Amino acid sequence: MASIVSLKIGQRAIIKDFSVDVVPLKLLEMGCLPGNEVSLVQEAPFKDPLYLIINGSHLAIRKETAAQIEIELIDG
């Protein structure tokens, strides 16, 4: 299973699945939902948190949470 943590800077993916118990409600409200596109913009110096663009929203999420969000990479 690939997760957001496995993205490299500039890579894009589609969110496939996650446990609602793991992902904070605030992320869901900001567009972190299955079917939406996610791309990695930047990593903090110790790779936590990750700076992402999810469906047009700029978000920083903890690596622990990102590891629970399953993705499918977009070619190209």
Image (cartoon, rainbow, N blue to C red):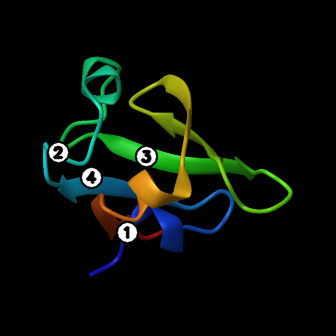
Q: Position of residue 1 (x, y in %)?
A: 26, 81
| Number of numbered callouts drawn | 4
Q: Position of residue 25 (x, y in %)?
A: 25, 25
Residue at coordinates 51% horizontally, 74% vertically from top-left? 6
3D distance between C-alphas at marks 3 and 2: 10 Å
Q: Identity of the amino acid at label 3?
A: Val
Reading the image, the residue beneath label 2 is: 34
Local secondary structure at mark 2: loop
Determine whether label 2 and label 4 are within 8 Å by CB. Answer: yes
3D distance between C-alphas at marks 3 and 4: 7 Å
Q: Answer left or right for 28 relative to 26.
A: left
Q: Position of residue 70 (x, y in %)?
A: 26, 64
Reading the image, the residue beneath label 4 is: 15
Local secondary structure at mark 1: loop
Seen from the viewer's position, the closer of residues 30 and 20 is 20
Q: Decide which of tag 2 and tag 4 comes sooner along the chain.
A: 4
Reading the image, the residue beneath label 3 is: 38
Q: Decide which of tag 4 and tag 1 comes sooner along the chain.
A: 1
Q: Quadrant of residue 72?
A: bottom left
Q: Position of residue 3 (x, y in %)?
A: 37, 68
Q: Counting other residues with Cα less than 10 Å from the Cα at mark 4, is it few (<14), some (14-19), or many (20 or more)?
A: many
Residue at coordinates 42% horizontally, 70% vertically from top-left? 75
Q: Quadrant of residue 69?
A: bottom left
Q: Identity of the amino acid at label 2?
A: Pro
Local secondary structure at mark 4: strand
Determine whether label 1 and label 3 are within 8 Å by CB. Answer: no
Q: Counting other residues with Cα less than 10 Å from the Cα at mark 3, is it few (<14), some (14-19), or many (20 or more)?
A: many
Determine whether label 3 and label 4 are within 8 Å by CB. Answer: yes
Q: Answer left or right for 15 relative to 57.
A: left
